[in-house]
Image (spheres, rainbow, N blue to C red):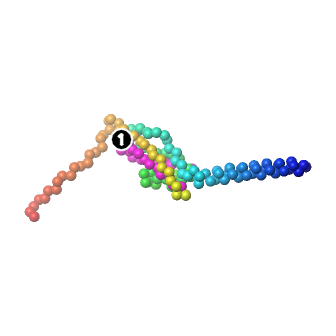
Amino acid sequence: MNPLRESRIVRLSLLLFFVLLIAYGTYEAGSLLWGPQIRLPGDTVVISESHATIRGATQNVADLTLNGTVVSMTEDGIFEKEVVLMPGSNRFVLTAHDKYGRSRESAVDILYIPPPDSDPPPRRAETAPATTTGAI
């Protein structure tokens, strides 16, 4: 064989090896480079029911909270949490932390408009002034 031809094959093989090594290293270091990710449905959601389920997906997340409450996730990063809504605008903030201590927040806005035939929320009982009976 021609020594120059062998040299080209060796160079090409080494170049391909190092390109694949860099690509694999970038893929494996993705969690370190890009940090925690949260994927949620888009804009504000309008609902006429008092309960809703927030669903989404995460990547590179060690723990996830919704307004301070821990949310469980599958191994694939899929999560689902049922929430109770108050009439009007409701904002839920998801906070994700990765194993390196970095965090990312994402918010979900849900507008709850009760149906017109539903009962209004109960009023707070007003406290009556204290009265004393008997002699002091």
Q: Indicate whether residue 115 is drawn in magenta.
A: no
Label 1, secondary structure: give it. Answer: strand
Work out whether 89 lies above or below 100: above
The residue lying at 26 percent from left, 48 percent from top is 124
Please state which of residues 6 and 52 is positioned toward the viewer in this rendering.
6
- What residue sits right under mark 1 in the picture? 88
Whether residue 123 sits left or right of residue 97 in the image: it is left
Percent x, y for residue 5?
86, 48
> What is the three-letter code of the residue carrying label 1?
Gly
Q: Residues within 10 Å of mark 1 (few under 14, many from 20)?
A: few
> Quarter of the image holding residue 134?
bottom left
- Residue 77 in view (yes/no): no
The outermost residue toward the front is 4
In the picture as drawn, the residue positioned furthest to the right comes out as 1
- Single out the residue that lies furthest toward the bottom: 136
The reply to whether residue 48 is in sight is: yes
Percent position (x, y) of residue 123?
A: 26, 46
Query: Where in the figure is residue 122, as x and y percent of width and height?
Result: 28, 45
94 drawn magenta: yes
Tell me if 131 is positioned left or right of 94 in this view: left
Magenta region, residue range: 75-98
